[in-house]
Amino acid sequence: DDGEAIVSRFQEYLRIDTVQPKPDYYKAVDFINSQAKSLSLESQTNEFVKGKPHLLLKWVGSDPTLPAILLNSHTDVVPFEESKWTHHPLHAHMDNQGDIYARGSQDMKCVGMQYIEAIRKLQASGFHPIRSVYLSFVPDEEIGGHDGAEKFAESHLFKSLNVGIVLDEGLPSPSKSYRVFYGERSPWWLVIKAKGPPGHGAKLYDNSAIENLLKSIESIRRFRASQFDLLKAGGIAEGHVVSVNMAFLKAGTPSPTGFVMNLQPSEAEAGFDIRVPPNVDSEALERRLVEEWAPAARNMSFEFKRKHSGDPLLTAADDSNPWWRLFENAVKEAGGRTSKPEIFPASTDARYFRNAGVPAFGFSPISNTPSLLHDHNEYLGKAEYLKGIDVYVSIIKAYASYESKSGSRDEL
Ligand code: MET
Ligand SMILES: [Zn+2]
Ligand SMILES: [Zn+2]
């Protein structure tokens, strides 16, 4: 198979409209299934939630008693502002430098297709896995994964697969070495609300809803700055500080021509995307929220739109974990290098697999590329894509031919 055919299959997947909030999941699943057929993989589709198909493929290994490998990817992508892109985000246009522009080119249709292409190459080389290799294509990651990976990871089906190690998405690296993730920050999607007496727009008085909300916003911004300063000072990675960013601000009394200008509203609210590292005292952070960010004494309340409860689990990324050693070596053998394992700054479905007791690494084999996840003009270079396939060839080969029983989950 030549590079051209490989790249055009990637483009074909990118052109399927799986944009939230109305992804065409069936089209994506049909496409991947047609690829699976050409590789004679076993296939099953389950709808843990109606209309949200989860596709599971299996490359059967020769020793069913050994824990299996799971290669996970999500089929949905985030929305885009079409007019801000150089090329239409669903056209998967390749420019004359070989860069392919599309939503999902980095996050993470690349990875899903690279798994497939790596298996194609391994089969062509005559390789036979000892451990079974599963490929999982999950829906809904970008809206929290509750109807996707979470249901799958909690299912009897998942238990029955006896998975020993999961690979899921990572982030592109601007340098030569690949980034790898062994844990992630927990998402807290927080909405704070302020109430206060309404009043004439010309009147100065205390405790209006907007004044109350602004005091909180000032306090939150001070905290944000303290965390950002740590990052700017260097020596600490993104995944180890708390990020707090405002997602929306809502206040005012609507009128047909905009907002009423001479009325101070009685309610105001703001939403924040907060990401909490595993090493942070989350109870202390929550106290800060109750006491400073949304104090009842200032007529404030709060609500979590999403909050990952419990401590996020970490996968050992050192010599105590044979899957780590194998991973690091396999990347090296493919001519790549991994940088120091990190905490993923955002969230991935890997947390659901870790919660199910299975170790998981976050990895997207993309080097020398700016991270453009959820950004305009997301792209991936053709050469980088092809190189990534060879990296997976090496990893899958190492994992699927690893015979030691110590790859069982009980020992990790
Ligand atoms: C918290 S749901 C995860 C959605 C997306 N992967 C993010 O990190 O924002
Ligand atoms: Zn993703
Ligand atoms: Zn994403």
Image (cartoon, rainbow, N blue to C red):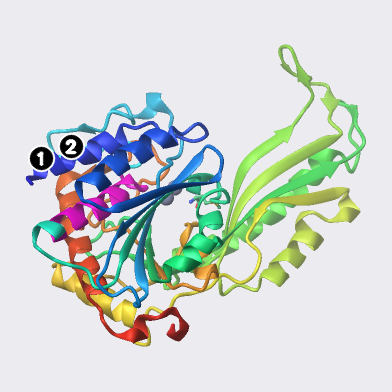
Q: Nearer the viewer, residue 344 or 396?
A: 396
Residue projecting furthest to the top: 256
| Label of residue 8 in the image | 2
Numbered range of the magenta stretch: 105-122
Residue 111 higher or lower than 65, as above or below: above
Q: Residue 144 vs residue 193: left or right?
A: left
Residue 296 higher or lower than 53, as above or below: below
Q: Nearer the viewer, residue 386 or 216?
A: 386
How many residues crowd mark 1 within 10 Å: few (<14), some (14–19), many (20+)? few
How many residues crowd mark 2 within 10 Å: few (<14), some (14–19), many (20+)? few
Image coords of residue 214 (percent x, y): 75, 45
Q: Residue 190 vs residue 140: left or right?
A: right
Q: Nearer the viewer, residue 249 or 231?
A: 249
- What residue lies at 24% left-to-right and 60% top-to-bottom? 175
Q: Quarter of the image containing the C terminus?
A: bottom left
Image coords of residue 110 (percent x, y): 29, 48
| Tag 2 secondary structure | helix
Residue 210, by quadrant, is: top right
| Labels 1 and 2 touching (C-beta < 8 A) | yes
Residue 18 seen in render? no
Residue 207, by quadrant, is: top right
| Label of residue 4 in the image | 1
Residue 324 higher or lower than 30, as above or below: below
- What residue lies at 84% left-to-right and 49% top-to-bottom? 300
Amino acid at pointer 1:
Glu
Residue 390 higher or lower than 77, as above or below: below
- What residue lies at 67% left-to-right and 69% top-to-bottom? 282
Image coords of residue 352 (percent x, y): 52, 62
- On whether residue 119 falls in the magenta region, the answer is yes
Image coords of residue 261 (percent x, y): 78, 21
